[in-house]
Image (cartoon, rainbow, N blue to C red):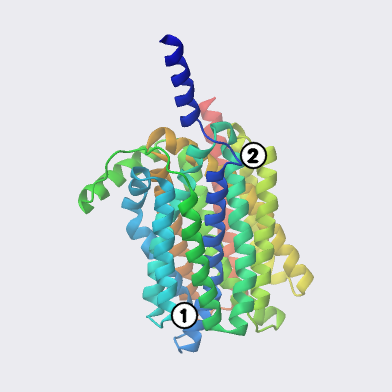
Amino acid sequence: MSANNQRLSKRARRKLAPAGLWSRGMMATLGAQFLSAFGDNALLFAALALVRKESYPVWSGPLLQAFFVGAYILLAPIVGVFADARPKGRVMLYANTLKFAGALGMCLHVNPFVSYAVIGAGAAANSPAKYGILGELVAPAQLVKANSLLEASTIAAILLGAIAGGALTDWSIEGALMVITGGYAASALSAIIIPRIKRAAPTISYSILASVKSFALQTRSLLESANARLAVIGTALFWGAGAALRFLVIAWVPVALKVTNNRLPGFLTGTAAAGIVVGAALAARFIPLKHVSRALPAGILIGVGVSLVPLAKTLPLAFGVMAFVGICSGFFVVPLDALLQKEGERDVGAGSAIAIQNLFENLSMLTFVSGYAVAVFLKTPVNDITIGVGLLLTLSMTTLTLTRRQSMRTTR
């Protein structure tokens, strides 16, 4: 009897053990994320072209992003709990179905701002699920590598999505929207393949007040950790500046390089994305979690690179600067994402930790994009805006790095 019990115990352990980096679940997660991110990044070009075609004012472009980000912020208190209370593969299925509905709305000429907000709601639900599931699919020692694979999948999607979005939009706005809608449908189908894995929480409360209170307590608990604070602040600064940079590139290309199509901004965005893949690979190779502070100087260099964009007066220089920004970005953000997942899994649950991270990232994005919209409304030259964003990011990242070093010295 004891031998049978031991065999059953071994089978149970094998069933609960993470399947590894190249398991079916991991491949399905990477595929679903690639298709979803492809749609997100191609959509920006098509959506901006759509509001221009429908004669909305120039400053309404950033307003689209505000509707998208606003959905993230409003849903932050519940999406993390929902991701932890349900099989995360199923959450990804629901999220990408919602994105499909929003993109289909744009195809059918529903108000573009409302449609973009629906897609933002899908993205808000997808984010804690796609990152939270990594800790269930791989062992802790493989978490940085799993994050690198997910980031590589995301960045490959950004690369191809930006290029395809620009090219398809130049060809046909309606055709681009149809391709994007198909991408979201394929992402939802890929999520079906992800196996159902343990739930971190057995129940979920649908009371808005209770959810907000719980989310506030979780946020306070998570941010009591110095490592979690570092990860949340660092990634928030990164994504806030990144959101502004995407609009800056689209506005800067016609002014500096005298090119008015959508393809070149797409190629430049794709170059930065390719750089992030390289930076992510370098981070996986050289930055273990216990030495995550080594990644922080790369954050300072991101700001320096953004400040150099106005000096790039030729195509080779523009591509070189964007590649530099991308490499520094990947090297900076991947270790911080892995650090937050580790801290979150131990404290509030991986899904809730990612939802908290999303709240801060999207508040940062809303701040940067709103500032950009105000600057455009005031007719500030695009080069001045770019230098301002670069300097702000450089100073912020320098402060973060010095604060971290001082904290480590105090701890010792």
Q: Amino acid type of disc 2?
A: Arg
Give the residue drawn at x 69%, y 39%.
Answer: 285
Q: CA distance from mark 2 to mark 1?
A: 39 Å
Q: 219 or 163: nearer the eye?
A: 163
Query: Sequence-wise, which precedes: disc 2 or disc 1?
Result: 1
Q: Nearer the viewer, residue 197 or 270?
A: 197
Residue at figure coordinates x 46%, y 11% from the top left: 3
Q: Relative to 93, is 218 above or below?
A: above
Q: Position of residue 177 (x, y in %)?
A: 51, 77
Residue 59: image tag: 1
Residue 219 drawn above or below residue 276: above
* Residue 398 in sight here: no
Which quarter of the rendered picture does the C terminus lie within? Answer: top right
Element at badge 1?
loop
Residue type at the position of mark 1: Trp
Q: Which residue occupies 44% across, 61% down?
A: 96
Residue picked out by circle 2? 294
Question: Label 2 crowding class (10 Å Cα cut-off): few <14, some 14-19, many 20+?
Answer: some
- Spot occupied by residue 263 in the image (x, y as percentages of width and height): 66, 77
